[in-house]
Amino acid sequence: MQEHIIHTLQDLRHYALGKGYEIELFFHEEDSYLMRFANSAISLNTNEHLIRLDITAYSGRKRAGYSLITNLDKVDEMKSGIEAAAGMVEHAQPLNYQPTIPAFAESFADESGYDPALAGMSSAEKMAYFNQAAKGLETGEIKLSGIFSSGTNTIAQITTRSDHSQVFKTSDAQVSIVLSHVRLKWEVTAEQSAQKKADLDPATLQRELAFLVEHYQNDTSQQIPLGSYAIIFGPAAIADMLKFMNYIAYNGGSMKRGFSFLAEDQAGKKVFSEHFSLIDDPDRLETYPFKRDLTGLVRKPWPIVEKGIFNGFVWYQDDADEFGAKPTGHTVTHKSLVLCGGDREIGSLEELANLPRQQDLLYIPFLHYMNIVNPTKGIITASSRFGALLLKKDGSVVVPYNIRLTQSLLDIFGDKVAWVSKSTLPYNTSDSYGARNPTAILVPRFMQVNGLEISHSNSSY
Amino acid sequence: MQDQIKQQIERLRSQGATYVDARWYPFEESNHLLMWNGNLKNASSSRESGIGIRVLYMGAWGFSAASDLGGLAGLFDQAFDNARVAAERVTFPVRLAEKEAIQARFESPCRINPFEVPLEDKVAFLKELDMKLDQKGVFQRICSLNFVRKQVVFLDSEGSQIEKLITEVFVGLQVNGLDDHGETFERTFRPGRHGLSRGWESLDQPFFAENAERIVRELNQVLAAEVCPREQRSVILLPGIMYLQTHETIGHALELDRILGYELAYAGGSFVTLDDFGKLRYGSEKLTVHADATLANSPGSFGFDDDGVPAQNNLLIDRGILVGAITGRQMVEEANATARRSIFSGSSGANRATAFYRVPIERMTNINIDPGQDGTLEDIISNTGKGILLDGDRSWSIGSNREQFHFATEIGWLVEDGRLTKPVKNSTYKADTLKFWNSLSAVGDSSTWEVKYVDNCGKGQPNQVMQLGHGVPVCRFDDVRIGE
């Protein structure tokens, strides 16, 4: 199959060269499968096989694109797409900078992230996974929801600048299981990200869900007072906040356009907590990495923040072209973010809840509907969801109704960080509105931040 | 092709499928242009075609989609196989509300096909606007044009055959500036309905130029403004934020699939329960809301939904009382059975998919608030003691059951004793949804009513982005927390 793809792209390249066009081809093939559960039933069982071809044409400083959903045997259709892009670029307006056309120095193919066993999982296996993860937990009032989303992604590239190509193939799975009370409206979740079939572990999810359900059924639920709390964030909350940092923190183009809370003169300075070390690490297969970027640059582990010290901005090729910066190998559809674990040996929520504590601790595993209130100050807002707990200092546990947090990421990841757990896990942050783009961030299981204000507290679920 | 699709539908029916439908897209084309600080950063087009097949078997759905119509029989079989698997875990067997078999055609109003307009003209349009925005105080200027045109053929096993040709035009202008402290602020203009058709002719240059000048002027007001106070006031929402308030805390909250728990694994649920229909006081008596898919010239008007149900104009909230929801054929049956009463008399025709490769789900149409009796914007301001006038969506975040929210707006103007006093920056407001709508104390008349477009409503797994509209007047709400 890979040979067929490369052969087709080379054919198209020769066609473009023969016409005197400068083009870049980005091929994307997905086999996507989704089993969705709601109200304890399978509400949707779907699969899609789609091939997209994105063609970018260049003419001096002019650039235009044409995309199509197509098939490998429709070479004439793809050539028509090239003609369309080439036709458009002639009428485009020149940029005020010279865009870079990738010229791959060598061919590169990476299938290290592809697991045929995961890609080939049957519907029956997926259903068995769900049955095991929810075993004994569904009742007449507690219903199962969730998804098992899995797929195979193949990306291939070629340009008229060289006859070398790049191919990346990955398999991925994102599992999310929700148990919710029909009448009381509480909801708890357990999630898993898998790059290979062996990563799938429904028994762990079942334990996590059972623990939460027990507390949600038996502990007091209440509206907690507004004020300052020591908050322990779980993996979903941490990953979501890091995802937003990707937009408004260390991206060079965002900084130049005024959408970053970090400034150029902060590079090399301590900006975050010494417990905070963030790396873009393409060696971590759990993050569905790109080991070369889409311009052909070799990607190596890239420390963005080391023990709180901000190392500097990362640059997409186009931003680097526009602002005269040096590209850093980050022209990818997603980075491979790793927030390093700390020294606190806490591996599970059960362990966390059973530890003696000197103060009340508000555990927030998940932040719902995060948005940026003020990019320059790094202020985000979001609500808690899915299994928050108030771990009282007397050892008891209270189930808090959802709360809202409106805070600066500089505070959340700054000197208020008390500790970070040693154990880490990949949290799947895939959000594929268009083409499948499996994404995961490796995060600590827990991170405690002291002195964070909650700005709203619900009076019920 | 239609005959081949019909044959496959009949074949699956003969093999035991309860219901089969297909949405064939002979084409869907789009054209995006983005000019950023005078640079044409994006000039791209796309074209796709394909088919999505939905099969109902033993009370469960199966779906499959592909762009390659060569293996049509295999694709129908795949959808059927997916339904067979799903049928192994059914709690409430899917059944579909009655509808008529319809043979019909719908075409959205469009006089000049934007895909026949030369690229040079589109670039020139953007360039002219970009020059208008290139003024003192503006640090970043962004102009965008998005065109979509698609043909959809719907066929089902109940005998419906519907063809739709839909054209959409979306335009956006944005300016950003930095205040004395280096803080970024923005002002945007995203026009809603302007005229009664939506082709190239809707790009009325003087109208856009006028609004370009306005947002630059208002951006400079924000840059020089004081910070919004942190206190309790009446908030007066202009259509530029009122549409989003309606969207997030009425529209999404009243999608029946959310109410029934079908979005709990992702987008969330709703504070609304089936018991609430007919009795929940959602808002003050000044609040009347319709879901109107028949509104002329809006992306929320599409002729027929993807169940093949005709567009309708339904009451959602009647003088403050919740009476209706946004529904498709499947959910109304389940809701009525679950509630053990007939809440819904049939589908409201709001089941839509964003592409051939996505399955239809409940989506907003045009969720509109009726104009009120409280006069013009000037009348409402003059009748407000201590308030703030707000416009522009800068940030929005809503609780998972749509029970509470936090919005940041692009600009605010304080109102003191019936007069606008000064602009403020970093204006925000937050509240509990029901408390907020019940504090609705003034609804502007038809002079304040505008139809705003939404081109990026996200929902569902797999994710889908949908286009729709909101007709909203200026509204005032009392005792709201601002500046937090």
Image: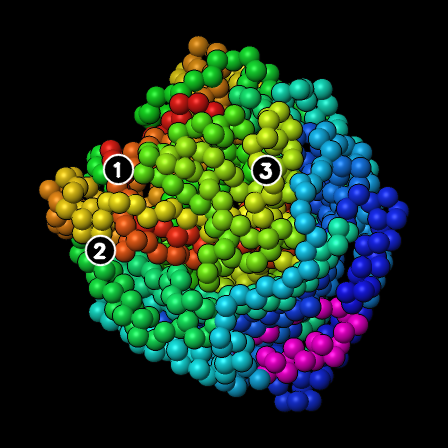
Q: In the rendered image, which residue does mark 3 sit on? A: B345
The answer to whether residue B122 is seen in the rendering is: yes
Tell me the CA gap for discs 3 and 2. Answer: 49 Å
Can see residue B482?
no
Q: Which residue is drawn at 52% across and 76% down?
A: B113
**Which of the numbered marks, if any, corresponds to residue B216?**
none
- Left or right: where B20 falls relative to A458: right
Q: Quick one: SS at disc 3?
A: loop
Q: In the structure shown, which secondary structural element does the residue marked by tag 1 occupy? A: strand
**N-term-proximal mark, 1 vs 2:** 2
Report the front residue among A113 and B253.
B253
A357 over A326 or under it: above or below: above
Callout 1: residue from which chain? Answer: B
Whether discs 3 and 1 lie on one chain: the answer is yes
Badge 2 local density, few (<14 within 10 Å), some, or many (20+)?
A: many
Q: Which of marks 3 and 1 is nearer the N terminus?
A: 3
Q: How crowded is mark 3: few (under 14 residues within 10 Å), some or many (20 or more)?
A: few
- Which residue shows up at 33% across the image and 34% down it? B285
Residue behind mark 2: B222
Mark 1 is surrounded, within 10 Å at the Cα level, by few (under 14), some (14 to 19) or many (20 or more) other residues, namely: many
Q: Residue B441 carries which label?
A: 1
Q: What's the residue type where badge 3 is placed?
A: Ser
Above or below B91: residue B267:
below
Q: Which amino acid does label 2 sit on?
A: Val
Q: From this viewpoint, which residue is outermost toward the right?
A: B15
Q: Which of marks 3 and 2 is in front?
A: 3
Which region of the structure is painted magenta? Answer: A64-86
Percent of width and height locating residue A316: 50, 64
Q: Where is residue A236 in the image (x, y as percent from the top left)?
A: 54, 37
